[in-house]
Amino acid sequence: MALNIVEIAVGDRSVGLAVARPAGAPKAAISFSHGAFSAPGKYAALLEGWAAQGLLVAAPMHVDSTDHPQREAFDQAAVWRTRLEDQAATLDWLAGQGTFGLAAAGHSFGALLALAAGGAGVLAPPGAPTLDARVKAVIALSPPPATPPLIGPEGFASTTAPLLVQTGDADVLPGFVDDWRMRLIAYEAPPAGNRHALVLPGVDHYFGGLICRPELPGPAQAEGFAQALAASADLVLAHAAGDAEAAARIAARSSDASFTTR
């Protein structure tokens, strides 16, 4: 299984989608937003892992990516607006591929986009797309903490879609996220109901280089990555595909100390 690139038009821009396709008919689909300065290809293990679970996955390359050929043409103010536009266009593209349900996912800065699609209140440029009622599940991998004015605690509280927030007890970025628990506001702030948190022991922001920064020396945190992949796929299957077995697997995780539900 390999990623293939599909070019779509987003306003006057051409945006490349890295697409991972399942072997059979898709059960549901995920729009995935990469972390700041990263690129979809640096998440191949994640995107292909979801596809192996029967999910169609599309990940746009945002203009802040160091791999983007026109990166220098966009200032910091344009990054947030174009990221929101990219996510909305990716969801539109996925919706055009079939009648299956949709989910939004992201890592780090990208998780904030997925949360916005699921109802989180963010400071968005006028006319920029945020909430998308088609999104039936949100996967927030290592989301940022409250970062006013972009998002405050009250912004996280308005998330409406079923949600999985994943972090690890080594998931810190000194000077920005000094305590991994800061990331759990995305899980703790919304009203209870289909909110799940997966806190993995020994897992850092990059699963040891398995996602986002493959140049890191490791060691790869493969066991934690497998858990995050399985739990996130189950959330999407349960809520975007109506898969009762996936819902039962989520419920069964209540016996796992790393997994909490509210």
Image (cartoon, helix red, strand yellow):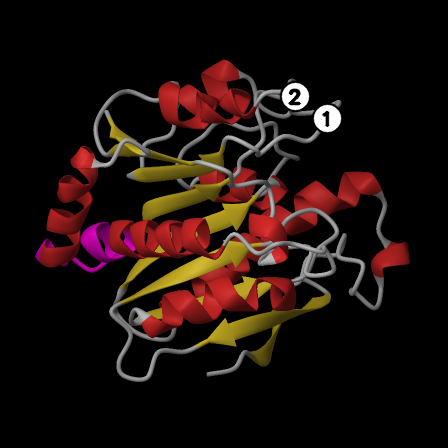
Numbered circle sitting on residue 178: 2
Between residues 236 and 96, which one lies in front from this camera angle? 236
Badge 2 local density, few (<14 within 10 Å), some, or many (20+)?
A: few
Taking 249 as reference, is 161 above or below it? Answer: above
Q: The disc labelled 2 sits on which kind of residue?
A: Asp
At 58% from the left and 23% from the top, the residue drawn is: 151
Q: Is residue 22 magenta?
A: no
Where does the image place residue 43, in percent across and percent down from the top left? Answer: 57, 62
The type of residue carrying mark 1 is: Pro
- Return the residue at label 1: 174
Residue situated in front as seen by the camera: 217 or 144:
217
Indicate left or right for 231 with 167 as reference: left
Q: Over which residues does the magenta segment extend?
A: 236-244
C-alpha gap between disc 2 and disc 1: 5 Å
Does dot 2 land on a helix, a strand or a loop? loop
Asked if disc 2 and disc 1 are in contact, CB closer than 8 Å, the reply is yes
